[in-house]
Image (tube, grey):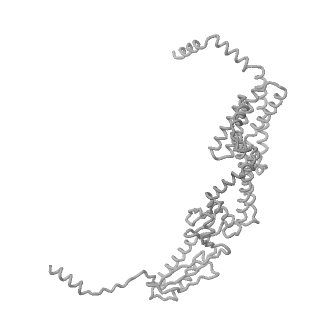
Amino acid sequence: METSLIKSFWLSAVSPKKLVFINDWLFENVLTYDHLSQALLIACAWLIAVLVGNRIKQRFSAPGLEQRRFGLIVVVLPLASHLCWLLLQLISLLIAMEAEWPHDLLTIVVNLLTVWIIIQITSSLFNNTAWIRMIAIIAWSIAALNILNLLGPTVKMLDRLALTFGTVRISILTVLSGLLTIALLLWGARLLSHQLEKRIRGNTTLSPSIQVLFIKLSKITLITAAILTGLRIVGLDLTGFTIFTGAVGVGIGFGLQKIFSNLISGIILLLDKSIKPGDVITVGETYGWVNSLGARYTSLIAPDGKEFLIPNEDLITQQVENWSFSNSTVCLKISVGIAYSSDVHKAMTLCEEAAKQTDRIIQDPPPRCLLVAFGESSIDLELGAWISDPVNGVKNVKSDVLLKIWETFQEQGVEIPFPQREIHIKNMPIIADSSKRHADK
C-alpha cells in the first residue's frame, strides 16, 4: 500500500514534460559521445595503471630489495597504481588540451585524483590529525574551484585585497601563498634535518657533545634558510622590513631574553664539553644522568625514573657536580657511628671488609675507614669506597654497604648507638613536699 502511494506521488510530481526535459538534458550534456570517449580513456588508463602498479609493487617488495625501501618509497609504494593512473591522465589531458578536444571529464578526474593522492601521502607523513584535516580542506577547496573554473577569479580577488607599507605590498594571496610555501619548506627542512641527525648519530668518531652541537646548528640553519627562502619565493623584499624587524627584534629580545640565554648557554655547554649526554651530575638537590641536551633545557633522569628538565642557564650560573667529567671513578663517603664502649680499630676494619664484600665497590683504590670526630652520642667514622659506574646509581650502593656493615656489626658485637641524654633532677624535696600536701588533703 505504501509503495503504491509513493509511486503515484512520484508520477504525479514528475510530469511527462519534465521527464522529456530531463531526458534531453542528459543526452545533450552528460550522455554524449565526448564524455563516453573520455570515460573509455579513463577506464583504459586505470587498467594500465593497475597492471603497471602491481609490477612495481612486486619488484620493490622482493626480499632481496627490502633494504632499498627507505624514505618516501615506503610512503609512495602503496600508491604506485594511483600515481601511474594520475600520470596517464595528465598525459591524456595535455594531449586533449593541445588538440583542443573536449576534456572536462578528464579535468575532473585529474583534480580529484590529485587531491586524493595528496591526502593519502599527507596522512602517512604527518601524525597530527589537525594538520591532515587542514591540508585536506585546502586541497579539496582548490580542486572544487578548479573544476568549477573559479580558481582564476578567486586568485585575482585575493590579490586585490592588499595593504601597502611604503614600497611593500602585501595581499591576502601573498600571505596565504607565503604560509603554504614556508610550511612546505619547513617540512622539507625537518625531513632533511632528521636525515642529517641520523648520519651524525651514526658517526662514531664524533663525541656526543659535538654530535648534539652539529645537530642543533644544522636544524637552526635549515629552518632559517627555509623561512628566508619562502619569503623570497613569494616576492617579499626583505630590505623593506629592516627598520620594522629591528624594532620588533628589540621587543622580542627583552621578552625572550631567558629563552635566548638558555639557547646560548646550551651552545656553550656543547662547545666546552663540560656536560654531555651520559654524564652523571648533581644540580642543587637533583641527581641523575644527562639524557639529552636540548635548545632550552637539559633532560636529567634520576635513579627513581623521574625526568627533570633543567634550564641550560642554571647549568652555567650554578654550581654543578659532574661525577664523570674527566673520570667515571667516584668516591662514596659513608658515615658510621659506634658506641664509646666499642673497639674502634675493630669497627674500622669491619667497615672496610664490609665495603670490599659489596659487588659494585672496586678494590683499587681499596676502601678506607677514618675516625673523623667524637660525637655527642657516638664515635663518628667515615668510610670511603670507590665505584666506577655512578650512572647505575649511588644511593643503592650506599644502601648495600650500610646493610653489610649492620650485619657485620651484629655478628661481631659492635654497638651502633642512638642519641641519649642524662637528666639530673635537683630540688627533689620541693616535689616531695607538694606530694605530701596532696596526701594530707
Q: Position of residue 49 (x, y in %)?
A: 78, 35
Q: Quadrant of residue 84?
A: top right
Q: Quadrant of residue 149?
A: top right
For the C terminus, give its image quadrant. bottom left
Identify the residue at image location x=82%, y=33%: 91
Residue 416 lies left or right of residue 311; in this view the side is left
Q: Is residue 413 visible?
A: no
Residue 72 position within the rendered picture, expressed as x and y whole percent measured from the top left: 74, 47
**Rendered position, 358 above or below 422:** above
Count of numbered marks? 0
Please provide percent x and percent y for residue 89.
78, 32
Q: Can residue 330 be seen in the rendering of this structure?
A: yes
Instruction: Identify whether 224 is placed above or below 150.
Output: below
As rendered, which of 138 and 71 lies closer to the eye?
138
Residue 422, above or below 165? below
40 relative position to 262: left or right: right
